[in-house]
Amino acid sequence: MQKKQIALLLAIVLSISCFVGCSSESGRVEVKEPEIEPIEEIVEEPVEEPVEEIKELTGITQREVVNGEMQSYLTGEWTSEEVATRRPIAVMIPNNSPAMPQYGLSQAGIIYEAPVEGRITRIMAVIENFDELDRVGPVRSARDYFLYTALGYDAIFCNWGLARPYVEELINRDNVHNVSAAVEGIYKPADEAYARVPREGYSLEFTGYLMMDGLFDAVDRLGYNWNYSEGHVPQFLFANDMIAEYAENEDATMIYPGGKSGDNASGYGAYHPYFEYHADDHLYYRYQNGEPQIDEYNGEQLTFTNVVLQYCHGEVRDDHDYLAFGMHDEGQALIFTNGKVIPCTWSRLAGDSIPARFYDATGQEVIVNQGKTWICTIWDEYSEYVEYE
């Protein structure tokens, strides 16, 4: 039994040895190295990160008709071709508390505000889209620096009264297209464009309004052309197809043209106007006397995409405290847009028909965002009161 077990074990060993490898010549057992295929070197190709397209901020330099619409000279926004090619109106409107609320201001593409005698401010609403309005006002008297500003917009100037020593000769020139209520000093009155609107508790001076039906009648009778003059130059260079963010500029979400603390003689110290920026809609909300400034036309607070503080040299002309400002000049300015402030300069040296233009520190024209703009003339001699934060 034991012999059989030994023989069996020998047979198993020999079988394993032959499986591993035998040499027929020596009978020696050889262990063969396993054949290993060479491993190819794996080279990983670099993964290209997606490159974000950088769009250059450009301004609107030419207008074209697209589906019956064009971009406005006043706002840069798309509007009907009829409105975009029609001259705007520039309406003189009081801005003191006894006149509030005004009617139709929310429809203005540009509102221009400047100090007047008594050290309050008056505004001029530059409106191109007035077809849905029945009236605008109340309407007050003209000062020459407002009229010079209106000429830069190629606007039809609308006023009820004037400071005769400084406006009479200017407003009656052939190249000035005005629709004026009949008062002394107006040679071509247009009373069909004005009417009194009862306002209980208001003084008579705050009841006169420009009536839209009468405006069209007056323009036709006076023979004024509704089309812009050839070669018209707009005031602003608006961003073409993207928001002008100015991310590296200083934040400015509150603007106080006359400062925050107390009265002063700058014109803006009387009723303490200010603007508050809302990041959710990129708009500046106008306040006066601590309350929202409301348009009686629609009950909405006045809002603007851009706010401009334009510093001008000013002088007192006479005992009536009539003021003068250097409208054909150069100076400093601050433009507020998208919650940022852009220090810049302004220049208006090319004549009455060219408005003030705005330039950054490199001499390039400032690109502002599409939308409505409020411009405050800041009396240079009172610039210390301007605050923003």
Image (cartoon, rainbow, N blue to C red):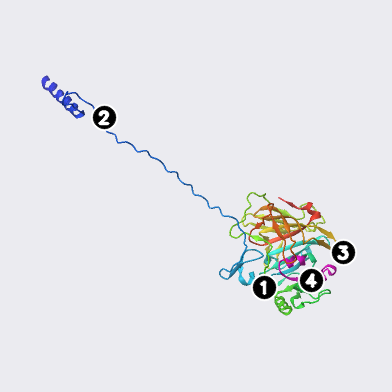
Q: Nearer the viewer, residue 227 or 75?
A: 227
Amino acid type for the residue under numbered disc 1: Asn
Residue 101 visible within the image: no
Mark positioned earlier in the residue sequence (4 or 1): 4
Mark positioned earlier in the residue sequence (2 or 1): 2
Amino acid type for the residue under numbered disc 2: Glu
Q: Residue at x 21, y 28 (%)?
A: 20
Find the distance from the CA under tag 1 to the CA under tag 3.
38 Å
Q: Is residue 170 above or below residue 334?
A: below
Find the distance from the CA under tag 3 to the CA under tag 4.
20 Å
Mark whose residue sits in front, 3 or 4 = 4
Find the distance from the CA under tag 2 to the CA under tag 1.
98 Å
SS class, disc 3: loop
Mark whose residue sits in front, 1 or 3 = 1
- The residue indicated by pointer 4 is 171
Asked whether disc 4 touches disc 1, contact meaning CB atoms under 8 Å apart, the reply is no
- The residue indicated by pointer 1 is 227
- The residue indicated by pointer 3 is 320
Image spot of residue 62 (x, y percent) = 61, 64
- The residue indicated by pointer 2 is 33
Q: Quadrant of residue 274?
A: bottom right
Amino acid type for the residue under numbered disc 4: Ile
Q: Is residue 3 above or below residue 261?
A: above
Magenta residues span 146-171
Amino acid type for the residue under numbered disc 3: His
Mark positioned earlier in the residue sequence (1 or 3): 1
Asked whether disc 2 touches disc 1, contact meaning CB atoms under 8 Å apart, the reply is no
Number of other residues with Cα within 10 Å of mark 1, as a class: few under 14, some 14 to 19, many 20 or more? some
Image spot of residue 128 (x, y percent) = 67, 69
Mark positioned earlier in the residue sequence (3 or 4): 4
Residue 148 colored in magenta in the image = yes
